[in-house]
Amino acid sequence: MNSRRYFLKGSLLAAAALSLKPLQGFAGLGKNKPAAGAGGPLVLSTWRFGIQANEAAWEVLGKGGKALDAVEKGVRLVEADPAERSVGYGGRPDRDGRVTLDACIMDQDANIGSVACLEHIKHPISVARAIMEKTPHVLLVGEGALQFALEQGFPKENLLTPESEAEWREWLKTSKYEPIVNIENHDTIGMIALDAAGNLSGACTTSGMAFKMHGRVGDSPIIGAGLYVDNEVGAATATGHGEEVIRVVGSHLVVELMRQGKHPQAACKEAVELILQKFKKRGADLKSAQIGFLALNKQGQYGGFALKPGFNFAVHSTQNNRLLDTDSLLPW
């Protein structure tokens, strides 16, 4: 099955199930300008599971809590859900049958923490925060990351669910490596938030592409690629084909474009355009590729943009919590 069918199917099902409509005027840059001062705090997260993640984050934001605490709590909900097959517990394994997790977190003061290729720990986002707050380092990986997590009291668990193991054993029959990024293998929840005090934070967590090479790390735990926050400007996060996001340091690029005065949606679009240019220059195959960016600025304006149709994100404000489809550069 191709990525286009998965994306269109997922988008239509999500919209039908939640009876939501795209944001009016969303394609017209600057027409929708929710301000934190007027409308209260905001939290945005990638994909349809962002609706539930936003609700968890809002338990913090709605009480005047910090954006950092909100984004950690929001993505932990998805990490703990075995039904979500691209994040945390229940995530699809690599080609060796091992579930490896990546995550990063960033606060208003540019404090950062990250973890990559972490096994046996259900909440890599909390490990990333512990790295940020309790060590002089930014990134821990593999066995070292696991050792640190266990020392911090995180329980060691088997993250390979029966459903994921069954899929992996079925895959072993052919061992065909096709890391197609689609609605069922989109591999990330990214969350960015603006709290009542006007401060920004973000979090990003994933189990990566299904049946990846053991040790593969995408953009999600890399500050500047999968996530970036500048409290003077805005925040951005990415989803999709991580290797392509890394090439352009995508989330940092989006924030820098917002620094230049671009609306968040325009900044996301420009980053996607740059990725497409590099795709074409390398002669890479676009068939299985998808990239999506999500951004929020200091004024409470937000937007998203994708390479292909199917990328959606959830927005929770004081008014409601809804799922929105983004525009895309390509029609398929």
Image (tube, rainbow, N blue to C red):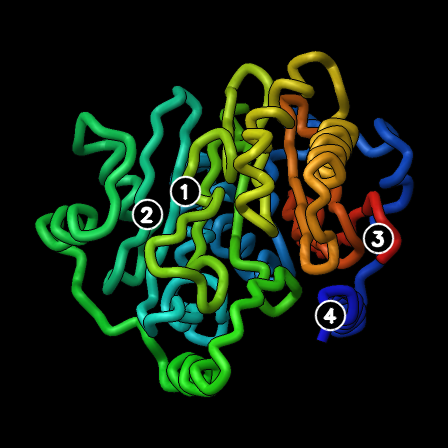
Label whose residue precedes the other's in the sequence (3 or 2): 3
Q: Amino acid at mark 1?
A: Pro
Q: Say which mark, if any, is on residue 116.
A: 2
Check contact, mark 2 vs mark 1: CB within 8 A.
yes
Disc 3 crowd, CA 10 A, few/some/many (<14, 14-19, 20+): some
Please report the residue visible at 36 percent of the width from the left and 80 percent of the height from the top: 161
Q: For the residues marked 2 and 1, what is the alpha-carbon distance in whole angstroms?
A: 6 Å
Q: Residue 69, how many percent across, how many down?
A: 39, 41
Disc 4 marks a residue whose amino acid type is Asn
Q: Secondary structure at mark 4?
A: loop
Q: Position of residue 98 (x, y in %)?
A: 31, 69
For image coordinates 52% across by 58% down, the residue present is: 187
In the rendered structure, find residue 221 and report the number of the disc placed on it. 1
| Mark 1–mark 4 CB contact (< 8 Å) | no
Residue occupying the point 18% across, 57% down:
154
Cα distance between the residues tagged 3 and 2: 35 Å
Residue at the extreme left of the image, as rendered: 151
Residue for badge 4: 2
Tag 3: amino acid: Pro
* Structural distance between the alpha carbons of marks 3 and 1: 30 Å
Q: Which residue is mark 3?
A: 22
Residue 264 in view (yes/no): no
- Quadrant occupied by the N terminus: bottom right
Q: Can you tell which of label 4 and label 2 is closer to the viewer?
A: 4
Residue 140 as seen in the image, left or right of residue 29: left
Which is more toward the observer, 103 or 19? Answer: 103
In this rendering, would 289 be left or right of 192? right
Q: Nearer the viewer, mark 3 or mark 2?
A: 2
- Who's the residue at 18% across and 26% down the image? 136
Q: Which quadrant would residue 302 be assigned to in this image?
A: top right
